[in-house]
Image: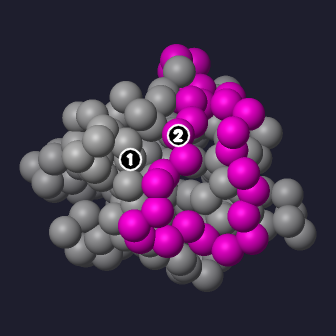
Amino acid sequence: MPETLTERTSPIQPGETAPDFTLKAQNKEDWSLSEAVKKGDVAICFYPMDFSPVCSTEMKCITDDFEKFEKAGAQVVGVSCDSFFVHEAWANQLGLKQTLLADMHRQVCKAYGFYWPDLNISSRGTVVIGQSDDGIGKVKAVRTRDIPQATTTEELLEALG
């Protein structure tokens, strides 16, 4: 994890440089934003906890419409503070297709402004990142949501433009 991630108290905004990071995915492999954004837009869906009702609905929605995101040339990933072991069990139980990233040290959710300090977990929101002309990830869209409000396919596709 780069030491350059700076904590912020409010969500990142469109036009800002996306903080680069590498986290472990549910398959225990490293996933890096800087590598992913070279292939197209990336939608990072921050969510509080695996195995919770709203988070399960939200991530299942993404899996059910996975092909729509692929056709849009975008990769959708989930980020929570759960471990990659928990992500793997949850993905297997629900049949999830998307990558789930383990932000166990809370550095990424804090760097993007999606940290819920009362419970020491990620809050809920989506950040769409594209590659700028200089090859750096730039924030294209940000959607914040209340904890009980799951994202929808339509909202995600709209944010992806």
* Range shown magenta: 1-29
Identified at 46% across, 62% down, the residue is: 16
> Is residue 38 among the parts visible in the rendering?
yes
User: How far apart are labels 1 and 2 at the CA level?
Assistant: 8 Å
| Nearer-N-terminus badge (1/2) | 2
The residue shown at (35%, 34%) is: 36
Q: Secondary structure at mark 1?
A: strand
| Residue at disc 2, secondary structure | loop
The quadrant in which residue 8 appears is: bottom right
Is residue 35 covered in magenta?
no
Amino acid beneath label 2: Asp
Front one among 111 and 145: 111
Q: Residue at x 29, y 71 (%)?
A: 159
Question: Which residue lies under the disc numbered 2?
Answer: 20
Residue situated in front as seen by the camera: 10 or 147:
10
Image position, residue 1 (x, y; %): 68, 29
Residue type, numbered disc 1: Gly
